[in-house]
Image: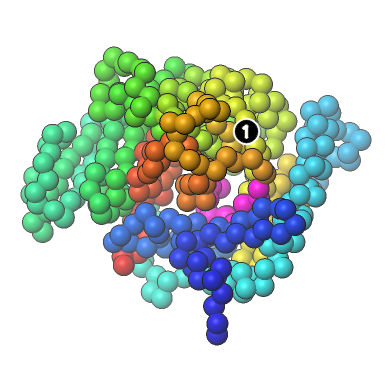
Amino acid sequence: EEMSDEVRSFLDTGIYRLVRDGSKVVFLDPVRILNHSYSRFWVSPSAYYSRSFETTTAALKTDAVEDSRILKKRKRTRAPRDLNESERAAEKRHQEARTFLLNAHKVFLEAAELQALLPELVKSEVSLPTRRASEQKFIQLGSLWQAPLYEISLCFRNKNLSDDTGGYRLGDHGGTIIVHQLYNNLICNETNEDVEAEFQSNHYILPSRSCFHMTTEFRIKSDLRQVRNLVPGNLHKSNQTLSFAHSKDGFNFIVIDPPWENGSACQKAMYPTLPNRNFLYLPVKELAHEEGALVALWTTNREKLRIFVENELFPAWGVTKFVLSYWLKVKPDGSLIGELDLFHHRPYECLLLGYINLQNDDSRAMPFEYLGINQVIVSIPGDYSRKPPLGQLLKDHIPGPKPAKCIELFARELGAGWTSWGNEPLHFQDSKYFVER
Ligand code: SAM
């Protein structure tokens, strides 16, 4: 059968753009996008999409828990006239989003070629490797007194690596093994290929030119200042007195998915959350490149949070000119993962995109396409409310020199050329999420 250019390009990039009647809708396959970060591995579709992958019992269980939660919520949902003031405001926002989202979903469903591909995306690899059940609990380990003593071994295949940061020894296959302190340390794979790392008999895949900083303490607000270790000029100087103002080396793209408090017990068990005000201490402005940075902030649908972001957080970070995008979550059959009108359980999330340090008369900055309109990102969600990757999708909207320098705060995964900061940035790098090429 003839393949259209759009399909061919989608199969390569994982990005399918649908532009109809002035609305901007884009479908993403995170697996295909993430694959561009790796040279020796593929991201395993069945591990990524395990929520939608019927044969894993774990996924079924998660769904059962979620379903019963939705049912309980549904019983508790009150009639609109009982809503309090902020709930009414949130409802108003939702109504505005609603038309926009329904139209986007319609456009998505009408793309017949794309619909035909969906079920294939979540299919298992030919032979599914046996998966270890145990997953490393980085957050818990980081809270132990031993945390500073934990070490991770990076296994480079190349023998001739010069090493100035950690101890090293020769590996079994003639490569070099470099040992780093795991927590509160900036660890980089500066080579141009994937590197395997080992920690307590689990293996992790580190993409080319990726860096991560796994932080330990997270109980008090001042701990967020740890991010300052990543402020340009402070790199490689962790645990020392820090200085600022080196923004020539700053980041052009800053993705932030904070651990917002949101009353959901399920979320609480998964990772610690922080009160909104703590995020005012994130040195986002300092992380930005002097020729400008695009900031992508994931938020929830809660009205109080949206007001806080617009009135306090963005001004504190120096973020201006922002637009609102939506992430619409669908199943492999194209339908929404839940009812659009379920009050506390929307099938969409909000993404605020804004700029820092952008000068109107900027002749120094490299040309980029200013992001001026709302768009809808459609994708099949992965596990643990994992967000779809944004770097490729937004690359034309990132100011400053190319290739853009990108950082993700509160990250649970790494990317080629990215810096990841959080208390579990290796979470999705576990080798169980990958298959060898
Ligand atoms: N964007 C991620 C993804 O798509 O997989 C999800 C990020 S999740 C909303 C927030 C993350 O922040 C969790 O991994 C949580 O453990 C981490 N976190 C919570 N408190 C933290 C703190 N004080 N310092 C660093 N990370 C923290």
Residue that appears at 57% across and 61% down: 16
Badge 1: few (under 14), some or many (20 or more) residues near its Cα, within 10 Å?
many
What residue sits right under mark 1 in the picture?
Answer: 322
Q: Is residue 205 above or below residue 96?
A: below
Seen from the viewer's position, the closer of residues 359 and 373 is 359
Seen from the viewer's position, the closer of residues 125 and 79 is 125
Read off the magenta span: 375-390
Residue 427 in view, yes or no = no
Quarter-wise, where is residue 224 in the image? top left
Seen from the viewer's position, the closer of residues 369 and 431 is 369
Residue that appears at 52% across and 34% down: 295
The coloring applied to the image is rainbow
Residue 358: image location, x then y, percent: 52, 28
Residue 380 shown in magenta: yes
Residue 389: image location, x then y, percent: 49, 49
Residue 220 shown in magenta: no
Residue 411: image location, x then y, percent: 44, 39
Residue 18 in view, yes or no = yes
Residue 208: image location, x then y, percent: 29, 50
Horizontal side of residue 379 vs 391, given as left or right: right
Residue that appears at 43% across and 31% down: 364
Identify the image quadrant of the C terminus. Answer: bottom left
Residue that appears at 33% across and 38% down: 212
